[in-house]
Image (spheres, helix red, strand yellow):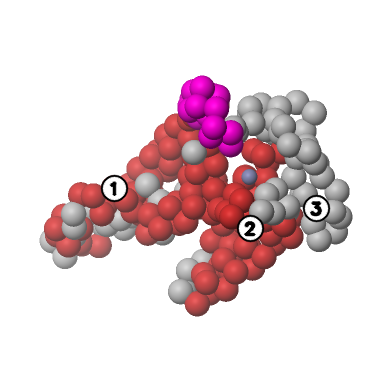
Amino acid sequence: MGHALAGVAVSWVNHKDTKARGNHNGTKAQREGTVRRLYERWGGGLTVTCAILAAAPDLDLLFNAHRTYTHSIGAVIIVTVIAALVARWRGLPVARVALTCGAAWGSHLLLDWLGADTNPPFGIMALWPFSHGWYISKVSIFDSVSRRYWLPQQFIWGNLLNVGWEVLVLAPIVIVLGLIRVKALARLASEMPRDHHTAE
Ligand SMILES: [Zn+2]
């Protein structure tokens, strides 16, 4: 939950989204569904991708290798390179898409590094493949996630509290970035050439 929020925040840091500029002059834009327009306005595919990428490192739970390779600088580099290739293939701005996706994945490492860990070895294998050491921040901002599903009190209520805290910490960041984005988009829209009116 917190990771996905962070991914959204990362994708909004770069708000010069060509797709999101939107042409408000044409009738085609008016015919577009409101949902579609809102989706593009709030980042479209890149924001959704970043939300998924920011949560994806925890898929390593399925392979019994939690907080190892996927939680490392090596993984960030791999994701950045793959994102660059995909962006190139799809004709998107390569550097921006690659760096945004890499940062989204990296945000997961940062949040986990700042989180408490109750299972040794503590932290994440942050510097793989350069080092197999484990790293964790001395101060933890986030509590550890309970996977003790046989203790409903701890599993349900403890984790609900955790989610609430994550939202409390990250929501203000997301809201501020969202407001900056709205302002930037408004400015871009006002700077758009009014080519539809020149014929009049
Ligand atoms: Zn993780």
Which residue sits furthest bottom? Answer: 89
Q: Mark 2 falls on what kind of element?
A: helix
> Is 79 positioned to the left or the right of 194 in the image?
right
Q: Mark 3 falls on what kind of element?
A: loop
- Type of residue at label 3? Leu
Q: Name the residue under label 2.
A: 63
Q: Residues within 10 Å of mark 3 (few under 14, many from 20)?
A: some
Q: Is residue 88 above or below residue 2?
A: below
Q: What stretch is highlighted in magenta?
A: 147-164
Q: How crowded is mark 2: few (under 14 residues within 10 Å), some or many (20 or more)?
A: few
Q: Mark 1 points at which residue?
A: 38
Question: In the depicted view, which residue is nearer to us: 196 or 93?
Answer: 93
Q: Which residue is drawn at 80% across and 28% down?
A: 138
Q: Where is ligand 1, by quadrant?
A: top right
Q: Earlier in the sequence, mark 2 or mark 3?
A: 2
The image quadrant of residue 180 is: top left
Dot 3 beta carbon under 8 Å from ligand 1: no
Contact? badges 2 and 3 (CB < 8 Å): no
Residue 194: image location, x then y, percent: 26, 57
In magenta stretch: residue 17: no
